[in-house]
Every structure is written in structure tokens, then in C-alpha cells.
Amino acid sequence: MKVSLVVSIYNTAQYIEQCVRSLAEQTLEDIEIVLVNDATQDESMAIVEKTLADYPQRRHQVQIVNHERNLGLGKTRRDGFAVSKGDYVIFVDSDDFADTRMAELLYNKAVDSSADLVICGFYRYNGTKRVPDTIVPHGSSETGDNIRDDIINRRVSPFIWCRLIKREVLADRRILWPVGNLGDDTVIGSQEAYYAKTISYVDKPLYYYRYNIDSITKRRDEKIILNNYNSFKKNVEIYLQFLEQEGITEKYGRGVVINKLRLKNRVLPLTDSFQYRKLWWNTYPEINKVLLFGNKYYKPSYREWLWVSAIMTGYYCRYRRKLEKKKYRPSDEWL
């Protein structure tokens, strides 16, 4: 088996048909599709079965794993990987979909370049418009040798759905799997980049990342924000554990700062309350000084200094709309 496509499914009935069709119609014949039902509460799995009926030639290549209770994206991806058999693996989110050439082009690139990890471009897609994007900086070498540090240091996003990874890398006993739903890409993406001996990329957008404004990561409900904060915190701790385990915390000091900062900023929408302003302040408090004055890993811009000042004084929520405008907004990695 050349490639396993692993899909985590939870309450995405609106999008799952498009996702499954994009995988069943892959131009690479020697694939398997692993669908992990994370105790979805909607009609997703019924739609999956109905959709698969249109592809009888693929049915023997499909595995369905059912969770009795919701375990979250990190454990769902882990369980999907555990039953997969492909030499290479691609993780797919069930509200996204893939170009039908994705598996073939990434697999061929991996074979031709003897790469453990192959990254491709992607589209940011809102249901009507698509905008091409990439995590690979312009000017990167064809072999991707200068991508590894950027991923672990969080100079670029560690998305794991726009990449193909060799099974042996993730099967390594050193791999620390994430938990929960947030920050899992940071945990797995950083380890994939570190343990991959060779990284390459295909300069084509082959994945459609759906920008869903109703996503759990974008709601401002207090309970959801706190749940997201706690989920993200667990995965930041796993990321830090990975760095310590490999003795590379000093080398990737910038990644440490950025990921701690991203956790702090999970509670930004609630900082009009002193209780949550205090939580922001007490989350990795050593980062507060860095945000104001910088250190050898990280130098805050004027925009970032402005945001930190607004948070510390309690003015962030009052001036949120103004601060979030392009003129004042920090880089996306900061958020």
C-alpha cells in the first residue's frame, strides 16, 4: 500500500461528502482511506456510507474506525494512523477536501527525492472563493532543507494536512502524540519536521482548507474559550516535552516563546474581566517581559507592544475592533 489517507470525522455532515469524494477519486490507485468516527452526533457516517456506495471499486480500500465516545482530534488521528498500512500517510480534516491528484503527486515526489516528508501548497477556501497559500517561504530550496527550523520555531504554520509523511517517521517510539483538539498540528508537525531526514515540497496547491467562521476555534463563548485554552495548554506542554526530550529547547527558543504566547492569547476575548486578565498574565508569566522588551529569540514589533499594553491595562476588549484592523494587527503567528 503506497498511501493511507486518514480522516477524523466529528459533526461535519455539511462537508463530509465532498471530502470523501475527493479521496475516492484520487488518481493514485494504490491507496487506502481510513475514516475515524469520533462518536459524531450528526448524520456524517450515514452520508459517508451513501457516498462510498458510488465508488464500489474503492470499498475494499476503506477502513472505518468507530469511537464509542468523543476523544478529540489528536487521539483520533493517532488511532487512524495505528490501523493504517500505507508506506506514507496524509491526514485530512473532514470539513476540508483534497485535489484528486494530491496523493499521486506527493507520493511521486517522495519517491523521486527520497524524502520522508513532502509538503504542498493549499487553498484557503470559504465555500465560494479560493486563495492559494503555502507554508513554504518563497525562496526555499527545492530540498526544503531550510524549512525544518522554520516549522519548529513557528515561523511558518505546522499544518499537517498539506503534507505526506513516511510511516516510519510517525511509527518511531519517540513520537509524542497530541491530545484534545487544539495545538495538535504543532505537536505532530514539529516532530515530523525534526525526525524527517529529508524534506521536499510540491509547489502546487493540492489541499482545500475550509475557513469556517462557525469553527470551534473562532467562537467567543466563555465555556468554549476556556475549553480551547485547556486543550491548547496540554499540547503546548507536549511540544515543550518534545524539545526537552531531544535536548533542543535552546535551539528552538523562538518556538517556545511563540507557542506560549499563542496559549496566553486564547483568553484574549475574555480579558475585559479582571479574572481572565489575571489568567492571561499568569499563563507562562516569564513571557510577559519578553513581550514588552524582547529577548535573543524574539523581538516584539510596535504593533505587538501596543496589543500587550492594551491587554495589561484592560483596554484590549474596549478597543478590540480597532486593534484587529490591519493597521494595528500583529502577525498571524502571534495569534
Image: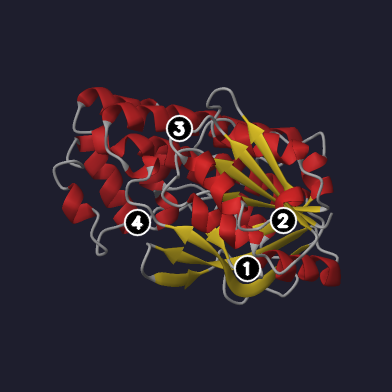
| Callout 3 amino acid | Glu
Instruction: Give the mark nearest the N terminus, 1 or 2.
Output: 2
Q: Residue at x 66, y 34 (%)?
A: 65
Residue at figure coordinates x 71%, y 69% from the top left: 27
Contact between labelled residues 4 and 2, with CB atoms less than 8 Å apart: no
**Image quadrant containing the N terminus:** bottom right
Instruction: Tell me the SS state at disc 2.
Output: loop
Q: How many marks?
A: 4
Figure check: 253 above or below 31: above
Q: Position of residue 257 (x, y in %)?
A: 51, 43
Which residue does the numbered mark 3 point to in the structure image?
Answer: 286
Q: Secondary structure at mark 1?
A: loop
Name the residue that disc number 4 marks: 330
Colour convention of the picture: secondary structure
Question: Marks 1/2: CA distance?
Answer: 14 Å
Q: Earlier in the sequence, mark 3 or mark 2?
A: 2
Q: Residues within 10 Å of mark 1 (few under 14, many from 20)?
A: some
Q: Which residue is mark 2?
A: 58
Q: Is residue 159 visible?
A: no
Nearer to us of marks 3 and 1 is 1
Closer to the observer: label 3 or label 4? 4
Residue sitting at x 80%, y 48%: 167
Place of residue 47 in the rendered image (x, y in percent of width and height, measured from the top left): 50, 46
The amino acid marked with disc number 1 is Thr
Q: What amino acid is at disc 2?
A: Arg
Up the image or down, 152 lies above or below 237; here it is below
Label 4 to label 1: alpha-carbon separation:
36 Å
According to the picture, the residue beneath numbered tag 1 turns out to be 100
User: Nearer the N terminus, badge 3 or badge 1?
Assistant: 1
Q: Is residue 203 left or right of residue 236?
A: right
Q: Cβ–Cβ below 8 Å for labels 3 and 4? A: no
